[in-house]
Amino acid sequence: MHILANIINLLLPVFPIKKNRLVCRWQFVVFLLMAILSGCVKAESKEAPIDNFQLKQPAVAYNPRSFSLESSSVLSRKEITEDLRLLRVSGFRSLVTYGSKGLLGSIPEMARNVGFDSVVIMGIWDPFSKEEWSNALAQAPYVDGYCLGNEGLGVRYNPNELAAKMDELRRLTGHPVTTSEPIDSYLTGPYRDWLLTHSDWLFPLAHPFWADQSDPAMAVDWIVARHDYLTAKTGRNVILKEAGYPSGGVERISEETQLAFFKVLESKGLSFFYFEAFDQPWKKNILRHHEVEAHWGIYQSDGTPKKVAEWLSERWSKR
Amino acid sequence: MMRRLGILIIVIIANLILSNQSAFGTSGGVTNVGALASGAIEDTGSREWVELHRAGDLLIGRPAIKDIGLITVYAPGVDESHLIIREVKLPDGRRSLFFGAPNKLSRKTLRATIYMKHSAMNLVLLENVKGRWIERRPQAIPVTENVSSEILQDVIVAFSVDKFGSYWVLEGHSQTPGQISAISQKQSASTLLGGGYMRGLLPWAGAFLLLGIGWTLSRWTHSLERKRVQ
């Protein structure tokens, strides 16, 4: 209070107050105090849900290029750091991960160290894995939010179990927590209400290619129509955890069409993570998935940039 | 006298020129004259002011116009705005829509989507982009709606557009929606709309006729004036 009074005294020569109106001075002090207090309240409200944060584009969905489900595969810190540096050169500042087992559980810290200065979301693949859980808690200082589970609602875990784990993670870390399912599950189906209620932000997966949208412009329209309907109906910020388009595996698909897709998508101003950083051949070789599954990367599995990565790097270098 | 006639002729010519321009929503008078001059005497039209409110990152509007359930607009930096929608129905069932928007909204819009109320999968929307008609295929979206404690399953149809301006909504399109992805830029409006050349020629014929009448009147009054002076 004394400090405030001194400040007012200093200001008196500039803004003279008549001595017989000293009450005004105290009114002014009270006014200043209220202003400061209201500032504090406002500052506190910045701790609001993740709905308020904005991604700095471009953002990328990242799995190391040396990752595989084969038991013989070994990840190294050096390789992951190289991956992250490569992505940083393309201008990426935000990323989302999928699992936190072993070295995967240190990716957020490594990403911060190589310059990922925007949003980092840490993925936990198995909500019941003790190893993933403890790694996730240890990385709390480096992450902005957690994504617990991925496309497993009603399959790998049930809604009640997941809700309990999400609450626990929120309580232990103070960070917002969500999960991810295909975007149509947020618009209809048995888990729609659950997803809208339990997600701190909406984090759907959008893959028009699997809805027979092979034309890049139509594929973007497919995403925009769903994304904007979801936003309009819920009033929530929707961040697409995965928005992607393959570059091979079937006819009519190429690096050119992949580039065209991402150029149109970028022009629409959506918040999305590029799906995905590197080609993942194990999805075809080990999981025996469709050939296309191995070609979603914007880099090949050996780190060679595809046309999208070249375009992003060029754009970034001009900034 | 001559001055009055001159002004009259200028007004007639200006009207003829205006009536042959593409009509945009906010210019109500122009749309009316344009519709009449385009042979749309039997057409029915309506105009609606649609308030846009913020929902998340988007501006959303719910027009009362039949069939359109929702409009979403992404225009960063614009908090509230409006659209003026002019709908003209032709006797054969075709509809034209004009979306007029304030300059700031038009300038800042990065994307807009029009959601139809019903799952009419045979709809096609033609968007006029820089003088070319671009065909927009519908996107079918499965949704669940909670309407007064009832849960309704539905499929709605959406069209994504680049900018506000003029559109045609056509029914009875035979191709599978959302599957054939090519956005045609080669088809002419006449081909897409199924219209004959008469619709295009009539305004021009009318314009020349009126110009001829104006010119004759001008010559006649001029000669009368000259005789009176002599």
Image (cartoon, coloured by chain):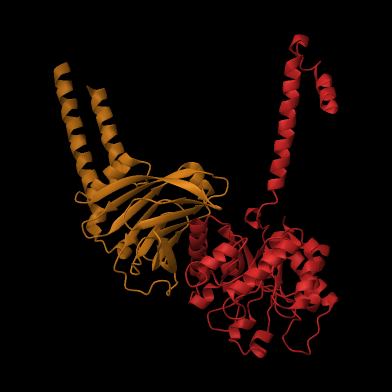
Task: Tell me the quarter of the picture where residue A4 sits.
Answer: top right
Specify the colour of chain A: red
Q: Is residue A281 above or below residue B187?
A: below
Res A127 seen here: yes
Residue in the image at 70% along x and 41% along y: A41
Q: From the viewer's perspective, is residue A217 above or below residue A304?
A: above
| Residue B138 falls left or right of residue A13 | left
The C terminus of chain A lies in quadrant: bottom right
Q: How many labels does the image show?
A: 0
Question: What x and y, as percent, mark residue A221?
Answer: 49, 65
Left or right: A42, with A219 as reference point:
right
Asked whether B212 or A298 is in front, the reply is A298
Q: Nearer the viewer, residue A211 or A216?
A: A211
**Chain shaded orange:** B
The image shows residue A247, relative to residue A199, as above or below, that is below
Q: Position of residue A318 (x, y in %)?
A: 72, 57
Camera-side residue of A160 and B125: A160
The quadrant of the image that shows the N terminus of chain A is top right
Q: Position of residue B150 (x, y in %)?
A: 39, 64
